[in-house]
Image (cartoon, rainbow, N blue to C red):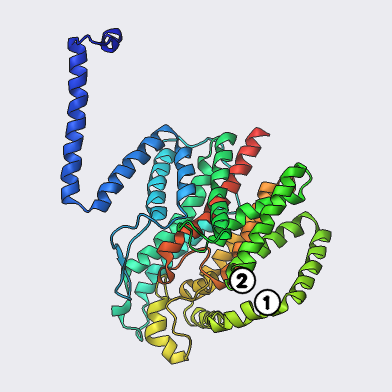
Amino acid sequence: MLDNQNLTEPGKWTPERIALVTRNTTIVVVAGILLGVFAVAANLYYVAAVVGAALLVAIVAWQFEAALVIYVIVAFVPWGRTPDLAMGGSGAGKGVYISEIMLCFLLVVWLGRYLLGALPKQRISSGYYIPIAIYLAYSLLNVVNSYLFWDPHVNRIYQHPMVNIVELVLRFLSAGALVMVATSVSSRKWLRYITIAMMVPGLYNMLNASIGGPIPICAPWWPLVAVFPVGYMWATAMQSGASRWHKVIAILGVMLAIFTIFYRSVSWVSGWFCLFVCLGTITALHSRRFFVLLLMVILIVTFTAWPFIHKNVVIGSQEEGDYNRFALMADAWKYATTFPLGVGLGNYRTYNSFYYSQKWGSMVFTSAHGTYSQHLAEMGIPGFILLIMILGSGFTWVLREYRRKNDRFLLAILGQMAGISAAAFIGDYIIPTYHNGGLTTFSTTVYSWLIWGLAIAYVRISKVAE
């Protein structure tokens, strides 16, 4: 065995010290040579990816939850795009971003920990797991069905297997994010750290936008990321357990959110619609009387500010073509009733652009521009029902736990879930769509699944403490 005293004594070169220094130097030199050869032979992107993966491995080896904290903080930025991996009908290649790459890595590690029995031993059932499992199984069946029973009116040259694969992967990654967070958090300390990290992207994006966006780093559809922390502030303001100063700060935060998301971005209906449904749901669950009073205030404000709303919402939406979404909803129902299992994940553009829009005289869009419309068209009525089951069963489960604990954290999650579910009527805000920038917008949509997984982890750890 090496003599540690001799190794650390300055100025004394023993044979053991020489052997240790030689070995370490050799490792560094060989690693440098290998990295240099790889850098010459490979794209610079992959060199950076290898270095980043090595750092992530080191963090995971230390504490898996620390890697979750890092992911939650950085995933909202669509950065680290790979060279082109997928190509659809437009002919333009698309790469994936750090939100997908890092999540894939973490899920592989999570699976290894699951197989080795290294996850927290306490497990609970939830309203999410079974509907999600059925939904994913049906998604696979849906893609297979679209290949076996391809509509002969549509030329197969417009079918792109890579798009089908990406659509499947986005679903599995979303569900995987929920399960990973739900089962990996081991203590209240890490639950607190991950919760704080979950609020950072939304608060940062909101504050940055409120001062004019001087920092050119933001999430796509950033108001949707901000809804959860704003909902938590509103729940804090209404519940009796918080201190006066906490309530004042929370109310100011909610006012800033309304000013930034509604007043300054009023033309983007999805953002403030999601926010107001979130705040309304939290209010209604906490106090029905206050909810009625709030509705009266909203009606008065709407009447007073109607010229502003009419110009920027009614007329603005008409000029930007937002009302086309209603026609797209009707078209989605036509697809659902014509194709019992849908046209297949990722095939909306193929069917709509090259045959059925001409046959039906409908809108020529590459996607249905709405989570529910997209599901009706591509996955049929069964897929639509399964999605509703995930949202309905999950909401009911969280609501039951909230009523048992009267906890503002769960109340905020209920508000977020209601808000994003409502906004999903007019956008791809729960499951992103490849042909509507889904590889980029996944950086935003994944947060809903992470938040819902955090709700499960919160309930699980609370029951263990009880």
Position in image of residue 184 (x %, y %): 50, 40
Position in image of residue 379 (x %, y %): 48, 71
Position in image of residue 443 (x %, y %): 46, 58
CB atoms of marks 2 and 1 within 8 Å: yes
Per the rendering, the mark at residue 308 is: 1
Q: Which amino acid, mark 1?
A: Phe
Name above or below for residue 228 compared with residue 380. above
Give the secondary structure at mark 1.
helix
Residue at (53, 60) in percent of width and height: 222
Residue at mark 2? 266
Nearer to us in this view, 384 or 349: 349
Instruction: Let me know if residue 140 appears in the view.
Output: no
User: Closer to the N terminus: mark 2 or mark 1?
Assistant: 2
Residue at (28, 9) in percent of width and height: 9
Instruction: Let me know if residue 178 appears in the view.
Output: yes
Give the secondary structure at mark 2.
loop
| Apparent side of residue 253 relative to residue 291 in the rendered image (left or right) | left
Residue at (56, 54) in percent of width and height: 202
Q: Which amino acid, mark 2?
A: Val
Position in image of residue 46 (x %, y %): 26, 50
Nearer to us in this view, 253 or 439: 253
Q: Nearer the viewer, mark 2 or mark 1?
A: 1
Per the rendering, the mark at residue 125 is: none
